[in-house]
Amino acid sequence: MKTAKGKGAARPSKESLKPVDDRKVGKRKASGKPEKSRAPKKEKKAKKDPNKPKRPPSAFFVFLEEFRKTFKAENPLVKAVSVVGKAGGEKWKSLSSAKAPYEAKAAKRKAEYEKLIKAYEKKQASSADDDESDKSKSEVNDEDDASGEEDHQEDEDDEEEEDDEDDD
DNA sequence: ATAATGATTGTTTTG
DNA sequence: CAAAACAATCATTAT
């Protein structure tokens, strides 16, 4: 039944009700050689750089780190990561405003990441090229013009924001 | 034995 | 702007 106005595969029914709810997007490669057989496609030239800072953990991850510890503390027999993940996700949803400290920490992590990224890119700028087959070109050591990067380690332990307790 | 997977949500990243 | 990928974890599984 392909009517003349049929467009072959056009089925506009409810695009709003299921945007992209595929949790099966898990794509995480361990450090080393990811391309084995499940190579999605190296569309990006993200070459493996040992100096490349990984993405900063979101508040959820920060919370998860602690949650996993607690979860395993009460469930030492749990082995599946999916269990802790699901449990953490559920609990996370439970947290409506208690994630303030996590967000704060995540924000800090991100700040550091930006700094790391800056430094990383700087090194990349050294050899602004796609491929570096030979790195025997003496590592460029230019730490002369620091953009004001000195020790900035403060103990911000008294940064509590517990004013939002009952949001809704 | 090495590497990917599975599951969570949030942020970073790229298109 | 939006969609995709990836961030940690860790036992289990696949090649």
Image (cartoon, coloured by chain):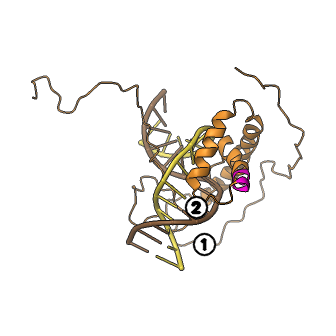
Chain colours: A orange, B yellow, C brown
Which residue is drawn at the image coordinates 69% and 55% (left, top)?
A72
Q: Position of residue A33 (x, y in %)?
A: 49, 68
As rendered, which of A165 and A31 lies closer to the eye? A165
Range drawn in magenta = A69-74
Main SS of the magenta segment? helix
The quarter of the picture where the C terminus of chain A appears is: top right
Q: Which mark is residue A127?
A: 2
Which residue is drawn at the image coordinates 61% and 39% (left, top)?
A90
Three-letter code, disc 2: Ser
Q: Which residue is mark 1?
A: A137
Q: Position of residue A66 (x, y in %)?
A: 73, 49
Q: Do labels 1 and 2 touch, CB within 8 Å?
A: yes
Is residue A64 a member of the stretch shown in magenta? no
Is residue A72 a member of the stretch shown in magenta? yes
As rendered, which of A50 and A95 lies closer to the eye? A95
Which residue is drawn at the image coordinates 85% and 49% (left, top)?
A152
As rendered, which of A75 and A131 lies closer to the eye? A75
In this picture, residue A41 sits left or right of residue A60: left
The quadrant where residue A92 appears? top right
Three-letter code, disc 1: Lys
